[in-house]
Image (spheres, rainbow, N blue to C red):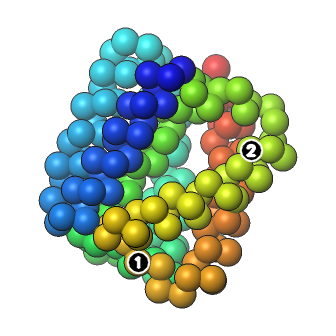
Amino acid sequence: MIVNFLLFQLGWFASVLLAARHVPWAGVLVVGVLIVVHLATKGTRREFLLIVAAVAMGAVADSFLLHAGLVDYASPTPPEWLAPAWILAMWANFAVTLRHSLGWLSGRWALAGILGAVAGPAAYWGAASLGAAQLTSPVLASCALALVWGVALPALLWVSARYR
């Protein structure tokens, strides 16, 4: 569990810092390697499906935030109407924690919702402070992020439980 959490942090920082330095594909590559190693050593076919579900959810959520004008991402990647690839890689990276370092949250829906509503916006504030994103309307963006992550974390844990 600790190794899973540390590798998640490595992927998060690689994605954010490399996007801030305008080399987003390098962060995607780092996360891709981490996920391939995870799936090869501890993953399952169903966990791969969980990662796909998380990326799909992230594509919808972060593309909405982008088009609503709440978040402006450094290093956009084609297609421009979709959230950047480095953000989608971060959703994939996050999905790898759901059965491991965040597995203790499974079935604790309210706690997962609260944790998502607090930690989700905090992660975006962290990315913004490192130059990878900008919250264009900080209060409104934080509220939207709290809503998105307050729903996304329990939803992904539910999907994880169904894919076991």
Q: Quadrant of residue 133?
A: bottom left
Residue at horizontal 40 percent and vertical 69 percent from the top: 129
Residue 15 vertical placement versus 10 (above, below)? below
Quick one: quadrant of the N terminus? top right
Q: In what element is the residue under mark 1?
A: strand
Residue 36 visible within the image: yes
- Residue at horizontal 34 percent and vertical 38 percent from the top: 10
**In this rendering, position of residue 88 left or right of residue 123:** left
All told, the count of numbered labels is: 2
Q: Residue at 38%, 21% (x, y): give it.
A: 39
Q: Residues within 10 Å of mark 2 (few under 14, many from 20)?
A: many
Residue at image position (80%, 32%) is 107
Percent coordinates x, y for residue 6 in the rendering:
42, 31
- Check disc 2 and report the residue beneath it: 112
**Three-letter code for the amino acid on which mark 2 is drawn:** Ala
| Identity of the residue furthest to the front in this view | 129
Q: 38 above or below 79?
A: above
Q: Position of residue 18 (x, y in %)?
A: 22, 56
Q: CA distance from mark 2 to mark 1?
A: 26 Å
Contact? badges 2 and 1 (CB < 8 Å)? no
* Residue 163 visible, this angle: no
Q: Which residue is mark 1?
A: 134
111 horizontally vs 53: left or right: right
Q: Identity of the amino acid at label 1? A: Gln
Q: Earlier in the sequence, mark 2 or mark 1?
A: 2
Task: Report the front residue among 149 and 163.
Answer: 149
Residue situated in front as seen by the camera: 139 or 109: 139
- Residue 42's x, y, as percent? 44, 14
